[in-house]
Image: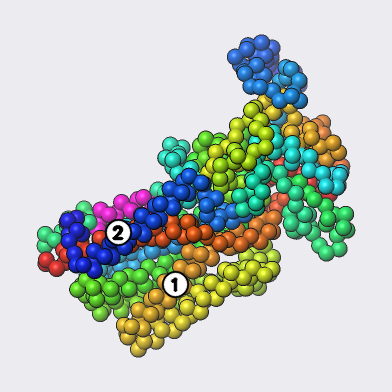
Amino acid sequence: MLEKALKGSRGYGIWVAFLLLLVAIGFFFYLRQLDYGLGITGMSRDVSWGLYIAQFTFLVGIAASAVMLVLPYYLHDFKAFGKITILGEFLAVSAVVMCITFIFVDLGQPGRVMNVLLYPSPTSVLFWDMVVLNGYLLLNIVTGWTVLESDKKGVPPPAWVKPLIYLSIPWAVSIHTVTAFIYSGLPGRGFWLTAIMAPRFLASAFASGPALLILFCLILRRFGRFDAGEKAIQTLAKIVTYALATSIFFVLVELFTVFYSQIPGHMHHLTYLFAGLDGHHTIARWMAVSAFTAVAALVLLIIPRMRKNESLLALACIGVFLSLWIEKGLGLVVTGFVPSPVETITDYTPTGPEVAITIGVWALGLLMITLFYKIFVSVRKEE
Amino acid sequence: MAPTRREFLKIAGFSAVGLVLPFLPSLSSAQAGIPLSPAAPGRLQALKAKRWAMTVEPRKCRPGCTDCITACHLEHNVPVIGNPKDDVHWIGLERVEHIFPAEAHPRLPESITKLPVPVLCNHCENPPCVRVCPTQATFKRADGIVMMDYHRCIGCRFCMAACPYGSRSMNYRDPRPFIRKINQAFPTRTKGVVEKCNFCEERLARGIFPACVIACKDKALAFCDLEDPRSEVRLILDKGLSLRRRPELGTGPQVYYIL
């Protein structure tokens, strides 16, 4: 089936070439980072994780969100998702590949990455994250590819795939829970030390992932001559609505706990995030955009008339994605480090090479999604 | 209580080994080809403890003195990079209000609030950095020293996020050009690995006290076995109230502050 990714329209060719160019630029700057060290980024002694780890965290959510298609289709026999479940699985595969790449480019000594396997450390959450992420990647490659191949042959998927698909449902929850535990298990970082971290991660994931899928479905209808169907898209929209509302609710719960209890160690971080601290306002400005977009998107999604209008739905989905990307792919990681353990406020600004590498990894993921979806659409057309 | 026959034999056996060991050239660390720093006298036995601990008495410090930092950083080839972003340090100076936020209040005397307090790795009894390390590149020894294996560290910086004290530094770039004078007795690091205070384990192995403790002319730092009731650290702790940084986190810091 892979050969189907090679033939396409002129627009497809240009898009693939464009993504390849971005990947190449990212790779060029990664070579420079390898040579110079991670000092080429904006990360510092105080803010020791930045854009890379934040992207990883955000993308684990995108990967986990495939379960929002798999679960209704396989557990509740919700037929409308039958056509697009594979899209979710391929999105998950691409997202996990991006996650692993982001972890890799974040390593100070990437040549020693195998030490994680050579000296397995069950007390480390990062070790378990590696286990669950790779397991999830494998599950989705195997199930997605096998189901698509059966589709091509016009036969029902083999029976052995079913247990793997069922397994992928709790597994999806596990990848984002374990990722949240990376943060919420650390004693000295008041911002992350909250039991709602994992539920919050899942809620925001189940909003941002399906929002992205809706956008992909709309793009595929326009450019790929593949129609996911009105019912599938509208159901996804409802999932996004509920998940977004839950996500906002969880943030408000966190804000209440922190600001009503008024424990300084917890309050300082959230003040920095939402209002700025001692004249450091950069992140707070981004968060204002995030908060506004989230509320606006929620309004668009809650009112059925607006949700059913596809242009407004697309706008709302862009809003959801943007808002949650700012929250998780920018604010969440950096704010854990500010103020530092000795109460210093260090701003973090990603550098040009760092942004180029980040865009390069995203382009790599988008390229994978493009190729997968091209194969998918070509197979579907033959039926 | 008199020792049983079995215990007596055990003690006797260990004593015999202990008598012979220093004369075996290949096993004695002092003769294993490690060059000694000029301060080191000829033959010394390794210093051992059940639990190493340090006391810091910042009020003894002379104003503006940074001798402990200089000595430590020279001993351990810590680079002087000169910008806060890429900064590497093992000992730092911080204000009381920043390291003891729970104890600080606006009516503290200036003699306390203006006091620079040396901060370093606390060599926690229950170290979060060790717990989170995905390769066991950072680990705790039986005598309580939390160590780093610079050759195993993959530079993921999970330990830096986990340390509640900001004791760890990342080599964001090659540190070697920024080392003023390389001490051949201690390894330099490569870019991309994390480092921190090691309680001078390399000196203890040669029977010498930590560089910072020796360098302090005001005797503001003491370093001994916490389990030994007659040790200097215990005598200082016996005098009154001492503080540890953020003890509520359950990390069990082994650096005690007398203020």
- Residue at the disc numbered 2: A368
Of the 4 image quadrants, the one containing the N terminus of chain A is bottom left
Q: Are marks 1 and 2 on the same chain?
A: yes
Chain under label 2?
A
Looking at the image, is mark 1 or mark 2 earlier in the sequence? 1
Q: Quick one: label 2, few (<14), some, or many (20+) residues within 10 Å? A: many
Chain under label 1?
A
Residue displayed at 69% across by 23% down: B36
A142 within the magenta span = yes
Q: Which numbered tag is attached to residue A322? A: 1
B216 within the magenta span = no
Q: A107 above or below B45?
A: below
Q: Work out how far the residue at label 1 is from the one at label 2, CA to CA, in angstroms.
A: 21 Å
Q: Quick one: label 1, few (<14), some, or many (20+) residues within 10 Å? A: some
* Color scheme of the displayed model: rainbow
Q: Position of residue A345 (x, y in %)?
A: 66, 61
Amino acid found under the numbered disc labelled 1: Leu
Furthest toward the bottom, the residue is A305
User: Is residue A122 in sight in this rendering?
Assistant: no
User: Is residue A262 in sight in this rendering?
Assistant: yes
* Magenta range: A132-144
Q: B116 above or below A270?
A: above
Q: From the viewer's side, name the closer residue of A325 and A270.
A: A325
Residue displayed at 72% across by 50% down: B245
Residue displayed at 67% across by 19% down: B30
Describe residue B84's horizontal placement relative to residue B66 as left or right: left
Magenta-highlighted stretch: main secondary structure? helix
Q: Quadrant of residue A302?
A: bottom left
Q: From the viewer's side, name the closer residue of A46 and A202.
A: A46
Q: B80 above or below A312?
A: above
Q: Position of residue B118 (x, y in %)?
A: 76, 46
Q: Position of residue A210 (x, y in %)?
A: 35, 70
